[in-house]
Amino acid sequence: MLTTRSRRTVLVAVATTCLSVAAVGAVAVAPSAAADATDPDFGPNVFVFDPTTPTADIQAKLDQLYAEQNSNEMGTSRYAVLFKPGHYDANANLGYYETVAGLGRSPDDVDITGAVRVVGQPDPGSAAGISALTNFWRSAENLSVTPTDWSNQWAVSQAAPMRRVHIKGILWLEPGNGGFSSGGYLADSKVDGITINGSQQQWLTRNSVLGDIWTNGVWNQVFSGVTGAPAADYPSNPYTVLPTSPVTREKPYLYVDDDGAYRVFLPALQHNSSGTTWGGADPEAGSSVPITDFFIAKPSDSARTINKALSHGKNLLLTPGVYHLDRALVVNRPNTVVLGLGMATLTPDNGTPALAVADGDGIRIAGLTIDAGPQNSAVLARIGGVVRHHDHSANPISVQDVFFRVGGPWEGKATRSLVVNSDDTLLDDVWAWRADHGNGVGWTQNTAATGVNVNGDDVTAYGLFVEHYQRYQTIWRGERGTTIFYQSEMPYDPPSQAAWTSPTGQGYASYRVPWTVHTHTAYGLGVYSFFNQGVDIRADRAIEVPKRPGMSLHDMVTVFLNGSGGIEHTVNDAGTAVVGSFGTSNVVSYP
């Protein structure tokens, strides 16, 4: 996340588990039992409401969760609030690790009058007195909101997606009063009124419909497949606009059918698409899977139990909580769906990966947080085994709303966070974060070399956020890769230049495409420095790529935020230095 000041350690409140007051009561079943299609056991941290639930009860639960989670940045409580189709009067203010989602087939099936919002946090150390710089790990999905205030506020930074949402009014993306914000991600959504970007330093909007106008921007605003996107004139304005998205597949979502049975919808693959997948004359393309085809896991389930269910052909739904794993969760079967609710979190305790995904067609991984454990993991999540370059273009693997952390809740270690070996993989809203604040944070404590390693060919990434790793943030070795929006801060804490020097010069580039790669495309890349150890630390370049015709990079920015040292060049030897004081450097295209 971007900042112009030092971070503070956040005190952690340990939350207690609370019981559901929802209209649908959960019935305990044995872990191996089949899910009840109309009354599945989602555990005590999922609250399901229907239109007959008293409004006061709904509001009381929403207020209780916000009071518990508003300051619980590094805590272990996780919650999901689900609304069955119908109308509701509610003001849902989301804290950490809260997901609010509708259970309809269309966002308009769940009609909320009031708000589904995120507000700024008090920040006495800033001039504004308010900030959204650490508003992470929460989401809103598959519902419509008619604001009763003048707007629906969604003042967030990373790992706080808004997907498949209809805002019937104004959408406000900043905390107010000029406070900083560092988002963000909006997809498959419609905004009827103005979208006020305000202080948002960067933002990706993908496959959506915007109403009246999108106001202003700071450094890097990318629109891919967006109807109503603002006109681009980079760098006179910070907008990068692609009329269509080359290849997409929306995130799976939970819904209730006309018979009251729970199902998971799997949206279809799209090429050169724009606008939303819903709201048109034709039904949304895709397929549906009954909840009875899922193993519904609880945090008390062991990795062995979960793997047994996967090996027997079940899909996996992870209910909210922290899953401590003594071995990796292994996904081998093609077309398996792994879906987390309420920021479900995987933590490998023994230095293994948290997730090992085979090189198979159509596997979908969505809605997870993955925390490094106390023993170093060589990799936290691996997509594909040995690089074999099998063609998955007709039915790719997708990784959506998956967020990695090394340090923060506790001291963690992981050499690499995400390794993608499978060709044609879709990455869609991924944040890999070596913690700069929280617990177990320091150059020799939360050690982590690289955030994202892409080895497969024809991989496409939308919304790639990679921050604070100790060497390269991202290494892209696969051919014909495409990145649409990239945000990265270099590590804050190198103790010396000698400790942070790469084979190609001072510091490590954030985004590296090795010289063996012949074709690569990227749009809207922002790299930022804030070296805060009082040492003059330099990075010779933010982006390092081969200089050859197959490279096609567009709309890049480097920024000195604060601290000392800085970045000498934006891409290779192009771009001006941003060193020693606040400044920006823009490169429109390269080479």
Image: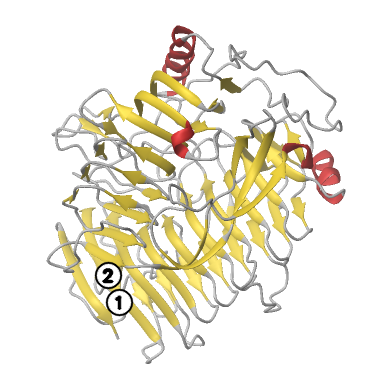
Residue drawn where x is 52% and y is 63% of the image: 452
- Amino acid found under the numbered disc labelled 1: Val
Q: Which mark is residue 216?
A: none
Q: Where is residue 33, by image quadrant?
A: top right
Q: Where does label 1 land, which residue?
A: 571
* Whether residue 541 is visible: yes
Asked if residue 336 lies left or right of residue 152, the reply is right
Label 1 Cα crowd, 10 Å radius (few <14 / some 14-19 / many 20+):
many
Q: Nearer the viewer, residue 42 or 554?
A: 42
Labels 2 and 1 touching (C-beta < 8 A): yes
Residue 352 location in percent, x, y?
72, 52
Q: Which mark is residue 556?
A: 2
* Whether residue 374 is visible: no
114 up-or-down from 261: above or below: above
Most extreme residue toward the bottom is: 549
Q: The residue tagged with tag 2: helix, strand or loop?
A: strand
Tag 1 or tag 2, which sits nearer the N-term? Answer: 2
